[in-house]
Amino acid sequence: MPIINVKLLEGRSDEQLKDLVSEVTNAVEKSTGANREAIHVIVEEMKPEHYGVAGVRKVDQ
């Protein structure tokens, strides 16, 4: 059972997230041969205040 965890900064529409789950599922099914019904995709959205690169929070850029 593949479990895929995707972390994104918040701000995508419901339609974008729906498409993301579908496309990730398709890619995992194609590349691993896993049964589609066994593929789990977890999307975690983060606030820009909770994400930083090179010592700077995304919200502060």
Image: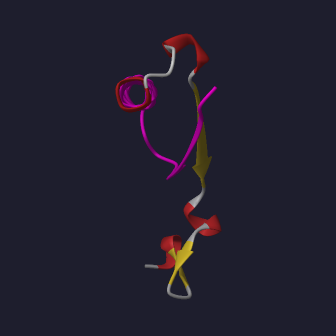
Bounds of the magenta span? 1-28
Q: Give whichever of 41, 46 is nearer the camera.
A: 41
Is residue 15 inside the magenta stretch?
yes
**Point 55% across, 75% down: residue:** 52
Q: Which image quarter holds the N terminus?
A: top right
Q: Give whichever of 2, 41 is nearer the camera.
A: 2
**Point 50% across, 21% down: residue:** 34
Residue 8 position, x and y percent, is 50, 51
Is residue 2 inside the magenta stretch?
yes
What colour scheme was applied to this rendering of the protein? secondary structure
Q: Give whichever of 13, 38 is nearer the camera.
A: 38
Residue 24 position, x and y percent, is 41, 32
The number of numbered badges drawn on the structure is: 0
Asked whether, in this view, residue 4 is left or right of residue 31, the answer is: right
**Point 56% across, 23% down: residue:** 39
**Point 56% across, 11% down: residue:** 37
Residue 27 position, x and y percent, is 36, 30
Quarter where residue 61 is shown? bottom left
Q: Residue furthest bottom?
A: 55
Residue 18 position, x and y percent, is 44, 24
Q: Residue furthest front?
A: 33
Asked whether, in this view, residue 49 is left or right of residue 35, the answer is: right
Q: Residue furthest top?
A: 37
